């Protein structure tokens, strides 16, 4: 509350007052008293303003595009954010600094994120800036940080005005893919969304002529041919069925790794949205299936209506914002990130008045070794780092216990049980879209997110789809297989079954951002340190090798494997769909 | 107000009333300069020392004060104040040594004293507001390791300059009454009058600070939001039952770890 400037103003004044009183300088005593009376008056006024005004501050936020005020935007679309802080209190605040907390997904293009000035009931403070979102997800605005001060800088107070608003960021529309050239091969094309199929059906296109079988409808008899051959001949027409495309999207933690908006999952969502949009324009059906190592979570049956498209886009948006969860994250790794978030967004919950920490506690009862999970780092009770981490854990445990309604023993539970604490901290960070650092590999160099069970899950899902499926189906498997090359057997069997039922399968490998895609020209990263460059090259080589292994494994069955990091992945999927249609025509 | 109007309002600058003066740092520099001049004149008139010594001492104060006004020196207000205080203290001290302590020195509502108080306070306020414009009003965030941002020129208003007119004389008058009350014959303990005055002043300041701080703390608790109140209650419960809770939860954590270990061992077998 009292700044260093205020402290160094008060101390010399008080010292001079003491000297003036003891030596008996009347005029100096008067001056010191005048200064102190003013100083205490300022403090009193500051506190009064604070208490009277803080509860009467309101925050309004609007997101505008060219269409006006909106509730959702497209990825990579420019949007203008206007934040208005108004006060209905009778007291005016002489100096307020309002700082915007930019969501993790947003990239600010222009405008100011910090304004200062006086805040009165008739003159609200407003700031405007422009942002874009590189990837789909949820744009979550927590609120604004406000810092209050008197005009001399003796007293300050910082708090956070919470006004959480969430705006949906839909996947960018892949217009260029939808407009890709289509080679016309027949003069009479079926209606959009229906594709000729070399099986007898009910379309108008002639497929074959055969002998009349009793029971055939009379209108199907080819009278001229019958007359020529002197026996009854029946016409058979082509079947017209729509082509279905089912996207299997891997949502396991391995594709969620990375900064918010730059994860492999975001790219997969963009690909899925592009395919969905292109298929809808062709009136083909698109279905969706989300899975991870624990099972299939959401299945959307193939559809093509606008309602279906909106529903799928909504689900894709929800999925794109997922953050990784790992049971191996240690409390010590999570604490600084979560504590920083609380300091920013919930500063009043860390005040001594409501969340007190006895400084002697780490000396008295440090966490014993028999409740510490194996592998978790341990420190001496006398180390300052341990004291800091203990204090942070106690304060965060108190907040999380109240937030998640853990009851009377919740604080102690989170303070003593590492697993529960790690779980709650990850949940808290995920709710605020904050990513945290964690190890990707264990001490033996094994990838911690490999999750080999997911191949079994997707294999079962494909088999189920094949069992219930129709003809002409395309299965697009967006699955991270780069680090689990040895566990393909189940998936290979399922793919074989699908291929024998004349379905098409494509595998899309999620690709981490910042790593060169296979076949692309390596980027010249001259600015990086030598060790970083070497590590980058090593990772790239490893991933390229793993990708080649996956390609080889699936190439045996004629299944193409594409890299999600390439820009033309959507086009390749659409090309495959076109081939599917043309292939059927080629039968004739 | 509609959102479109809000947007338009955010883009266009706020309309200034006709004839409104734009306040800049120069205005505060002028105020500080005038206050320094007033201090200098009053000091010259009041001092009982020889003219050259008074002149030198006050010129030093003026020099330090002017440096602070013209150049960005962080400690200049305190140094100016000390430069004013030191000659006064020395003057009194030597007078006491020569003529014995004078306890009858009580002047109430003396114009020169009031003027000196007003001028000194005006100078200090002006100087610290200049510091706000130069160095910023808020301390920097230690976590971000960024420089403190100075107060923007656009946040200056004529109202804040006009706001100086009323409180400064009031403070000077209140100080007169405070000193008058202090110089009363408080016969609390067997001490010399100056030590008695000193103790009364210290206790009064401490008591006022303590009472006001607790009053505001109590007010804050009265208006606490639900989550903060829950946190407070939970914290109190934890402090009361910390030992028992710790034992139960440690046992529970140990049991959980053991179960996990056993299941891992069973899986391995």
Image: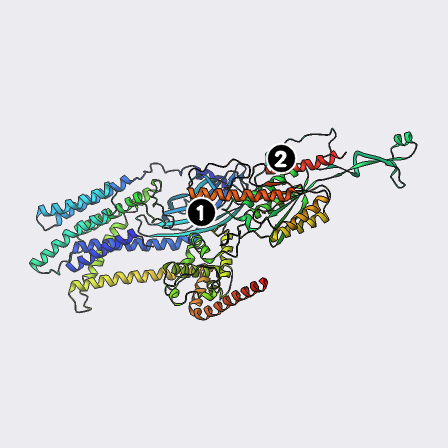
Specify few, some or many for label 2: CA neighbours under 10 Å numbering under 14, 14-19, or 20 or more: many
Label 2 chain ID: A
Residue A282 in the image: above or below residue A290? above
Q: Judging from the image, what secondary structure is the residue with disc 2 in?
A: helix
Task: Give the camera-side residue of A453 and A40.
Answer: A453
Letter of the chain that mark 1 sits on in the rendering = A
The mark that comes first in sequence, 2 or 1, is 1
Q: Nearer the viewer, residue A244 or A41?
A: A244
A113 lies left or right of B53: right
How many circles with numbers are drawn on the protein?
A: 2
Outermost left residue: B98
Q: Secondary structure at mark 1?
A: loop
Q: Which residue is mark 2?
A: A178
Q: Residues within 10 Å of mark 1 (few under 14, many from 20)?
A: some
Picture coordinates of residue A497 (x, y %)?
71, 47
Quadrant containing the C terminus of chain B is bottom right
Q: CA distance from mark 2 to mark 1?
A: 37 Å
The label on residue B143 is: none
> What percent of the width, then of the height, locates residue A486?
60, 50
The residue beneath circle 1 is A101
- Colour mode of the rendering: rainbow
Residue A89 drawn at (x, y percent): 41, 51
In this rendering, position of residue A281 left or right of residue A48 = right
> In this rendering, does residue A302 appear at all?
yes
Q: Which residue is nearer to you in this view: A479 or A286?
A: A479
Task: Report whether mark 2 lies on the same chain as mark 1.
Answer: yes
Residue located at (53% from left, 65% from top)? B256
**Front residue (pair A104, A534):** A534
Instruction: Specify the quadrant of the image occupied by residue A30.
Output: bottom left
Residue A511 in sight in this render: no
């Amino acid at each position: 509350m009292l700044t260093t400037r205020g402290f160094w103003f008060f101390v010399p004044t008080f010292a001079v007052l003491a000297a003036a009183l003891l030596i008996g300088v009347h005029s100096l005593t008067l001056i010191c008293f005048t200064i102190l009376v003013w100083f205490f008056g300022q403090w009193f006024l500051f506190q009064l303003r604070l208490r009277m005004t803080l509860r009467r501050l309101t925050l309004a936020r609007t997101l505008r595009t060219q269409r006006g005020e909106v509730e959702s935007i497209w990825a990579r679309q420019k949007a203008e954010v206007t934040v208005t802080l108004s006060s209905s209190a009778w007291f005016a605040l002489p100096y307020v600094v309002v700082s915007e907390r930019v969501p993790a997904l947003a990239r600010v293009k222009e405008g100011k994120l910090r304004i200062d000035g006086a805040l009165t009931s008739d003159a609200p403070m407003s700031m405007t800036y422009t942002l874009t979102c590189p990837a789909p997800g949820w744009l979550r605005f927590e609120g604004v940080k406000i810092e209050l001060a008197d005009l001399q800088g003796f007293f300050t107070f910082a708090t956070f005005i919470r006004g959480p608003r969430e705006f949906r960021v839909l996947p960018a529309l892949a217009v260029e893919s939808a407009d890709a050239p289509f080679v016309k091969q027949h003069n009479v094309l079926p209606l959009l969304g229906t594709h000729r199929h070399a099986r007898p059906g009910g379309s108008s296109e002639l497929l074959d002529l055969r002998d009349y079988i009793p029971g055939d409808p009379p209108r199907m008899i080819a009278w001229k041919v019958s007359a020529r051959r002197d026996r009854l001949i029946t016409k058979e027409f082509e079947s017209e069925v729509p082509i279905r495309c089912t996207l299997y999207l891997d949502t396991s933690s391995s594709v969620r790794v990375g900064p918010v908006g730059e994860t492999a999952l975001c790219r997969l969502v963009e690909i899925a949205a592009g395919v969905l949009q292109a298929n809808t324009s062709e009136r083909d059906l698109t279905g969706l299936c989300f899975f991870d190592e624990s099972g299939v979570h959401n299945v959307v049956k193939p559809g093509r209506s606008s309602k279906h498209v909106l529903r799928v886009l909504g689900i894709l948006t929800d999925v794109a914002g997922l953050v990784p969860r790992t049971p191996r994250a240690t409390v010590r790794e999570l604490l600084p990130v979560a504590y920083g978030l609380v300091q920013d967004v919930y500063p009043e919950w860390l005040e001594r008045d409501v969340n007190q920490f006895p400084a002697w506690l780490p000396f008295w009862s440090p966490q014993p070794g028999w409740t510490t999970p194996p592998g978790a780092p341990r420190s001496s009770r006398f180390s300052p780092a341990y004291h800091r981490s203990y204090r942070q854990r106690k304060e965060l445990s108190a907040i999380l216990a109240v937030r998640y309604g853990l009851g009377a023993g919740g604080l102690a539970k989170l303070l003593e049980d590492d697993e529960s604490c790690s779980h709650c901290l990850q949940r808290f960070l995920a709710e605020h879209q904050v990513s945290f650092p964690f190890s990707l590999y264990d001490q033996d160099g094994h990838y911690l997110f490999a999750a080999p069970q997911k191949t079994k899950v997707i294999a079962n899902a494909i088999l189920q789809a094949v069992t219930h499926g129709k003809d002409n189906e395309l299965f697009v498997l967006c699955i991270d297989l780069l680090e689990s090359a040895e566990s393909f057997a189940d998936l290979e069997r399922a793919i074989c079954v699908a291929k024998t039922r004349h379905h098409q399968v494509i595998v899309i490998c999620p690709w981490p951002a910042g790593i060169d895609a296979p076949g692309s020209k390596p980027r010249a990263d001259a600015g990086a340190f030598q060790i970083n460059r070497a590590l980058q090259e090593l990772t790239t080589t490893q991933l390229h090798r793993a990708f080649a292994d996956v390609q080889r494994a699936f190439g045996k069955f004629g299944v193409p494997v594409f890299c999600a990091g390439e820009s033309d992945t959507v086009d390749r999927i659409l090309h495959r769909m076109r081939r599917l249609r043309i292939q059927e025509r080629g039968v004739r | 107000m509609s959102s479109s109007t809000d947007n338009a309002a955010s883009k266009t600058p706020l309309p200034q009333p006709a004839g409104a003066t734009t306040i800049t740092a120069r205005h505060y520099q002028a105020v500080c300069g005038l206050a320094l001049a007033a201090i200098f004149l009053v000091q010259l008139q009041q001092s009982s020392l020889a003219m050259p010594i008074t002149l030198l001492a006050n010129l030093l104060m003026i020099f330090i004060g002017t440096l602070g006004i013209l150049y960005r020196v962080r400690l200049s207000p305190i140094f100016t104040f000390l430069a004013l205080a030191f000659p006064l203290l020395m003057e009194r001290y030597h007078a006491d040594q020569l003529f014995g302590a004078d306890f009858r020195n009580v002047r109430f509502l003396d114009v020169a004293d009031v003027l000196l108080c007003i001028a000194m306070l005006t100078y200090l306020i002006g100087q610290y507001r200049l510091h706000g414009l130069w160095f910023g009003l808020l301390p920097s965030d230690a976590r971000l390791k960024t420089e403190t941002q100075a107060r923007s020129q656009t946040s200056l208003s004529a109202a804040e300059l006009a706001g100086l007119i009323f409180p400064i004389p009031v403070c000077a008058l209140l100080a007169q009454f405070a000193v008058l009350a202090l110089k009363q014959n408080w016969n609390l303990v067997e001490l010399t009058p100056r030590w008695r005055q000193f103790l009364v002043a210290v206790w009064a300041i401490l008591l006022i600070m303590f009472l006001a701080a607790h009053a505001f703390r109590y007010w804050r608790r009265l208006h606490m939001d639900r989550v903060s109140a829950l946190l407070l209650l939970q914290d109190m419960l934890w402090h009361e039952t910390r030992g028992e809770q710790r034992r139960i939860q440690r046992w529970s954590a140990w049991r959980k770890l053991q179960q996990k270990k056993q299941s891992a061992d069973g899986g391995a077998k």
